[in-house]
Amino acid sequence: MPPPGCPLLEGSLWASPKNMREINFSGENDAPASWAPSPTSDASTEHCAAERREHAEEVEELDRLFSAVYPLVRQYELENASPDDTKVVEYQTPAELLAAMDFSTPDVGSEEEFVRGCRETLRYSVRTSHPRFMWQLFAGSDPAGQVGELVTAAVNTSMHTFAAAPVFTVMERQLIVRVAERLRMDTATIDGVFAPGGSYANMVAMLVARNEKFPHVREDGWEPADRPVAFTSVQSHYSIKKAAMITGMGSKSVVEVAADATGAMIPEELEKALAIATAAGKTPFFVSCTAGTTVTGAFDPLRQIKAVCQRHGVWMHVDGSWGGSVLMSEEHRGLLDGAEGADSFCFNPHKLLGVPMQCSVVLVNGHVGALERSNSTVADYLFHQSADAKCNLGQKSLQCGRKPDCLKLWLAWKRYGTKGLGHRVDLAMANAALLADKVKADPRFHLLIQPQSCQVCFFYLPPSLRARAAAEGVPALYAQLDGVTQAVCVRMQRAGSVMVNFSPLPDQGLPHFIRAVMIQPRVMAADIDFMLEEIDRLGRDL
């Protein structure tokens, strides 16, 4: 059990006795009401040489700022543990925000203004750690990751060379290997790099695939005879088209492949699309699969798609930005069956694993040196020949300055272990199944798709439409339900009571429907019930 006042929530993943076994809650390690510097801190600054006194004063400033801001952060997290008394967001329009907060930048600053800025930012920001934040494919962050972010900022280095970041360059490589092991990939031929988000990771994968197929483009650009074409599911993330824009091949060079009713790509349709493109004189080079689609959470049949890609000689990428984190779960790891055969794979620990944003990983599998062949340039002022040069990561990445985001994942993995991170995934899946069951059993709602992941997609049927829905069927009411869905979700956001999102699926002929994401480990059955009742309360007059 957590100690009184501890922000770790009873019944959550982090409060599990198995996961908390290394923390002593006898009382002597209880979280203080406010942060205070170590008794030796002030003494140590007094011993600095006179010419270094300014640096020592910065440390003293850090003590003061922590002492002032930590209680605000702690109170913010504790308020999130009382969802009946705390809103998800204190909604303000842009104009109201400009009036409520002081966004000015003074000529002469002060610590008081700094603390005030922190207080107002916490007050008006969306509380993504709130158990009724069910809106996006991320939610809050865990304590280990938050501290990791702090350490990252304190070290403040860049990942381009071993000389600048010896610990982090070695750490990143070891994490790449560890992730590959979880995916059952051959670690002898694995490579990878961390990235600032899944969109960027998808772009890196496409660039590497392009370079392997069209190596001349890197220096000379596209030639008229190249005619490149890429393929992805009609329900894939929009970043695939953005990547095509950035590569210069254009978004119209991305072929959208039909998906089934669950949202998964249909391998037979991919085969047809590849054959059509080849017959038209185009050059297929890249297929992007999705492990956890943005809207429905569907997993493409990776093993079947790999067979299609092998027959046509094209690169297979798996965009696991959302669902790739199931690699931590023994129960749900099978959803990634076939991922071990992918040429590249990416996932975002900052989504399902609760690592603070941003933290993304892209792996290149079985193509030794492909990242360098695609992304390296000559920069003698930075990349020097030495025995440590093999640890220089800057030639694998498109970035020069790059945060050591690997630390956040490494510390979270250290703190919670594979089992703890896997339990977080399992809990999210279980909550999604629970919500789906409640929706199916309630005549006020209509479940669209049995969830494969953590998203639950459904319609709310207001009293004015329920009889017609029973008599004519829900599809006959799509035009009305489109407006109902958008209205009730906006009302909830402005009330600040719950945040869920909405989305259409044009390829399936579906109008806007409610999409609730059960990623937050603090969600309890009571929060799910509250969300359903709040939808009815705010939408029954529609």
Image: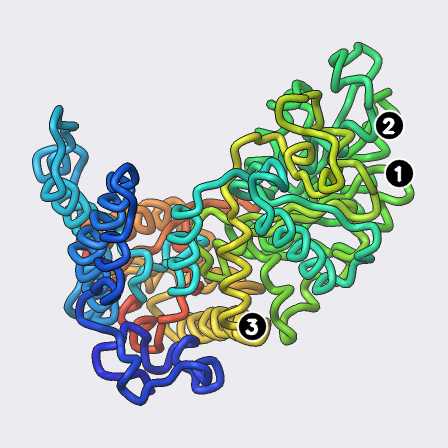
Q: Is residue 267 above or below residue 160?
A: below
Using residue 111 as the reference point, say whether residue 197 is left or right of it: right
Q: Quadrant of residue 31?
A: bottom left
For badge 1, the amino acid type reads His
Disc 2 vs disc 1: Cβ atoms closer than 8 Å? yes
Q: Is residue 533 above or below residue 257?
A: below
In the image, 385: left or right of 85? right
Q: Point out the frontmost of discs 3 and 2.
A: 3
Question: Secondary structure under badge 1?
Answer: helix
Q: Earlier in the sequence, mark 2 or mark 1?
A: 2
State the residue lying farthest toward the right.
311
Q: Earlier in the sequence, mark 1 or mark 3?
A: 1
Q: Nearer the viewer, residue 321 or 118?
A: 118
For label 2, the crowd category at 10 Å Cα-Cα, with few meaning under 14, some 14 to 19 and many 20 or more, is few
Q: Position of residue 167 (x, y in %)?
A: 58, 51
Circle number at residue 312: 1
- Residue density around tag 1, few if under 14, some if 14–19, many if 20 or more, within 10 Å: some
Which is in the foreground here, disc 2 or disc 1? 1
What residue is shown with label 3?
A: 417
